[in-house]
């Protein structure tokens, strides 16, 4: 038996297995585990691996799943995520799907449990162990270096500007190269915007809003603009660098935020990014 992110036990799948994934990075992982022929549903944001993923039916988005269409596809297993999917949606899915597998990787090391959870349930233990070994090698390589400490702001949206807290997978990925994301989780964001408290953030907010200020910029070594979920471009990076007078880098959001099999290449990408800083 294998426990998911909610501690629910799952036994090995048997009989006809029909898998729906409502998590883009997990969809890619399921393909990489060799489960393409068992996939019956995905979201419109599940875009990897190309072109194979196109053969799987789309059932809306991660937040707006078309439940009638999902029901008609009759999955035996649905994989969801605490951050990606709405709780009320998952509760409804439980009424017609026998097995709902909940995931919630919060750090690169959490991928080991994710690989073994899905590999165990779907009888792909050897493939899961292969991914675990590949990730372990990348983590050992990146940790073998002594990286200079940096404070970075990782922007995921503008209008309003949004960033990530240190409790997120992204922040913990960046910590592998000794990059600490702003703000410190104990910081009062309202105090960081020149006294303007019009956008207070709740304590523990995982994706807080912020406004640019001279005080904020002075704390930063660099700003990272992610290519997702907002589609930042090199033009955005150039314009912001001129505005704030700090290095601004456009970074591949999939590489830094997608867990699953993408984490192997993601850690390697991060090492290259840090080497170029």
Image (spheres, rainbow, N blue to C red):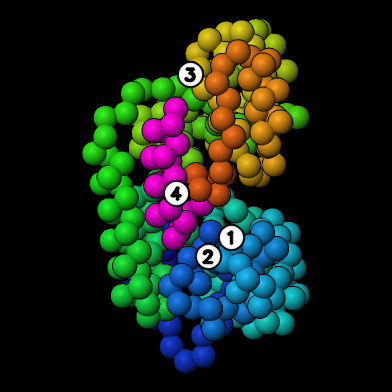
Q: Outermost residue, front direction?
A: 276
Q: Nearer the viewer, residue 95 or 116?
A: 116
Q: CA distance from mark 2 to mark 4?
A: 13 Å
Query: Which quarter of the figure is the C terminus placed in?
Result: top left
Is residue 89 visible to the viewer in this orientation of the structure? no
The disc placed on residue 16 is none
Question: Going from the N terminus, do you reach mark 1 or mark 4 first?
Answer: 1
Secondary structure at numbered mark 1: helix
Is residue 270 visible to the viewer in this orientation of the structure? yes
CB of mark 2 within 8 Å of CB of mark 1? yes
Return the residue at label 2: 28
The residue positioned 40% from the left and 54% from the top of the image is 264
Question: With respect to residue 188, does 166 lie above or below?
Answer: below
Task: Please name which of the two marks, 1 or 4, marks the residue nearer to the observer.
Answer: 4
The residue positioned 63% from the left and 62% from the top of the image is 47
| Label 4 crowd bin: few (<14), some (14–19), many (20+), radius 10 Å | many
Coordinates of residue 129 in the picture (x, y in percent): 30, 68
Question: Going from the N terminus, do you reach mark 3 or mark 4 first?
Answer: 3
Question: With respect to residue 250, does 62 lie above or below?
Answer: below
Question: Going from the N terminus, do you reach mark 1 or mark 3 first?
Answer: 1
Q: Which residues are magenta?
A: 258-277
The residue positioned 27% from the left and 39% from the top of the image is 143
Query: On the picture, is 230 further left or further right than 275?
Result: right
Return the residue at label 1: 24
Coordinates of residue 172 in the picture (x, y in percent): 41, 38
């Amino acid at each position: 038996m294998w426990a998911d992110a909610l501690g629910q036990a799952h036994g090995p799948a048997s009989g006809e297995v029909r898998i729906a994934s409502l998590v883009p990075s997990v969809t890619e992982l399921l393909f990489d585990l060799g489960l393409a022929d068992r996939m019956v549903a995905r979201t419109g944001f599940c875009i990897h691996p190309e072109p194979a993923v196109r053969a799987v039916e789309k059932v809306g988005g991660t937040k707006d799943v078309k439940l009638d269409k999902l029901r008609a596809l009759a999955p035996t297993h649905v994989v969801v995520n605490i951050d990606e999917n709405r709780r009320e949606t998952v509760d409804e899915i439980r009424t017609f799907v026998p097995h709902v597998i909940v995931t919630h990787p919060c750090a690169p090391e959490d991928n080991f449990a994710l690989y073994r959870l899905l590999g165990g349930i779907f009888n792909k233990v050897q493939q899961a162990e292969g991914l675990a070994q590949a990730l372990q090698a990348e983590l050992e390589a990146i940790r073998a270096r002594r990286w200079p400490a940096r404070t970075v702001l990782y922007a995921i949206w503008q209008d309003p500007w949004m960033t990530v807290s240190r409790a997120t997978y992204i922040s913990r990925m960046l910590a592998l190269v000794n990059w600490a994301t702003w703000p410190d989780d104990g910081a009062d964001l309202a105090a960081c915007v020149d006294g303007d408290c019009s956008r207070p953030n709740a304590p523990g907010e995982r994706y807080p809003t912020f406004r640019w200020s001279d005080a904020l910029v002075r704390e930063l070594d660099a700003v990272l603009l992610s290519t997702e979920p907002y589609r930042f471009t090199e033009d955005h990076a150039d314009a912001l660098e001129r505005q704030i007078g700090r290095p601004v880098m456009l970074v591949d959001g999939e590489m830094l935020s997608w867990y699953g099999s993408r984490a192997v290449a993601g850690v390697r990408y991060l090492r290259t990014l840090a080497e170029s800083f």
